[in-house]
Amino acid sequence: MIDCIWIQKLHSLGLLSGSLLLSDTFQQLRTYYYHHLHLVEQSARYSNKMQKALRLMNIRLDVVLNDITGQSGMAVIEAILAGRRAPEHLVSLVSQRVKKSRQEIADALQGWWREELLFELRASLDFYLLYERKIKECDQIIETFLVKYAPEVEVSMDEKKQLKTNRKRAGKHAPGFNLSHLAYQYFQTDLFAISGISYNAVLCLLTSLGHDIHKFPTAKSFACWLGLVPNNKISGGKVISNRTPSGKNQIAKALRHAANSIGNQKDHELTPFFKRIAFKKGRLAAIIATARKLAVIIWNMIIKAEPYQKSQVELSNEKQKAMKLKHLDKKLHALQLTKEELEKLFLKHSLSVT
């Protein structure tokens, strides 16, 4: 029998589950979002080219400023291209809020001027400004589309206050519209209550999936669709491979970025889980496992209408800590250490901590 006929027969008998097909609305939104990602990548590319041209002319603006495309950086670049290149004049264009001293800034802005590099700097600046303008246009189209198809949901005053409280710090290319309010209208929950979730992660989830997340019957199926669970290959009752499947799911990519930022934090409620997996299997496995946990939390918040309970995550961490202490107590009891050996061990541990 031909494979396609066999697959069609299995599907007609209900033995195969159908693939996820997004509705027309979210297929359009996803196209807009992917184009937005492309524009951001191109903008960053020409920002790097500007930094390279300045560095080759010995202008270390990247040492003085965290972002050369900020207000101070753009003022300095435009002055250089306009021919006003005296270090004293360039220093006066830098904001007083910059931590570097005026002398350090002046030293970083002394270089030699080469025509070919100035030409490259001018061209890169023009392309950068073009892409920044197109990013804003794309944001406006996405906002118009989201507002047009947003379900009518009444938000109480307490919920509005909570949305303002959970507002994240906006990044450079964060959407210019009220994303937290629109996401609440679509999902009926505040995803920004999860510390570590960025604007980009919520925007990616909203434009790439939206209402269609209800098509996943369980959190496990949602995490599996994202490619965040091991792909167990079993032969003869033995697991011969359990590597996570590769893929380019943008939602999974955004969640991995969020998981990576959680791993760099000290006081996040999911940091103990991240460190526990990283200690056993490495940082890459910890990023994937934490991203899967975030996917499960998001599914439960949207489908089951469960608000994010930070205390429950902390309680789970306390249970893990209690289990570790119990296991450690059993090990110490099995070693049958004397009182002097225990005191020596605790003294050595306290010295290493201090």
Image (cartoon, rainbow, N blue to C red):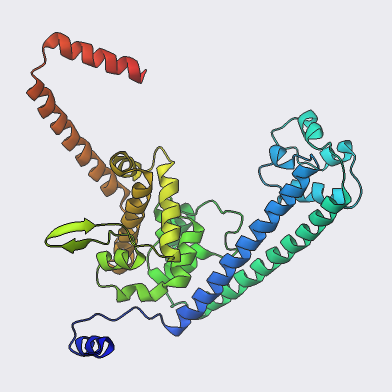
**Residue drawn where x is 62% and y is 71% of the image:** 138
Position of 197 relative to 216 (above/below)? above
Using residue 36 as the reference point, say whether residue 130 is left or right of it: right
Between 295 and 242, the one nearer to me in the picture: 242
Using residue 238 as the reference point, say whether residue 11 is left or right of it: right
Task: Provide residue 172's location: percent of width, then percent of height.
Answer: 61, 55
Task: Provide residue 242's location: percent of width, then percent of height.
Answer: 26, 57
Question: Given the current orientation, which residue lies at the most extreme front position?
Answer: 1
Using residue 104 as the reference point, say whether residue 200 is left or right of it: left
Residue 125: image quadrant is: bottom right
**Residue drawn where x is 66% and y is 42% of the image:** 66
Q: In which quarter of the image is the C terminus?
A: top left
Position of 120 relative to 303 (above/below)? above
Q: Can residue 249 be seen in this view?
A: yes
**Residue drawn where x is 31% and y is 55% of the image:** 293
| Tally of marks | 0
Position of 269 relative to 143 (above/below)? above
Using residue 232 as the reference point, say whether residue 214 is left or right of it: right
Residue 346: image quadrant is: top left
Between 149 and 101, the one nearer to me in the picture: 101
Q: Is residue 308 visible?
A: no
Q: In which quarter of the image is the N terminus?
A: bottom left
Residue 41: image quadrant is: bottom right
Between 17 and 103, the one nearer to me in the picture: 17
Question: Given the current orientation, which residue lies at the most extreme top position?
Answer: 340
Task: Provide residue 350's location: percent of width, then percent of height.
Answer: 30, 17
**Residue drawn where x is 84% and y is 56% of the image:** 119
Task: Provide residue 234's location: percent of width, then percent of height.
Answer: 18, 62
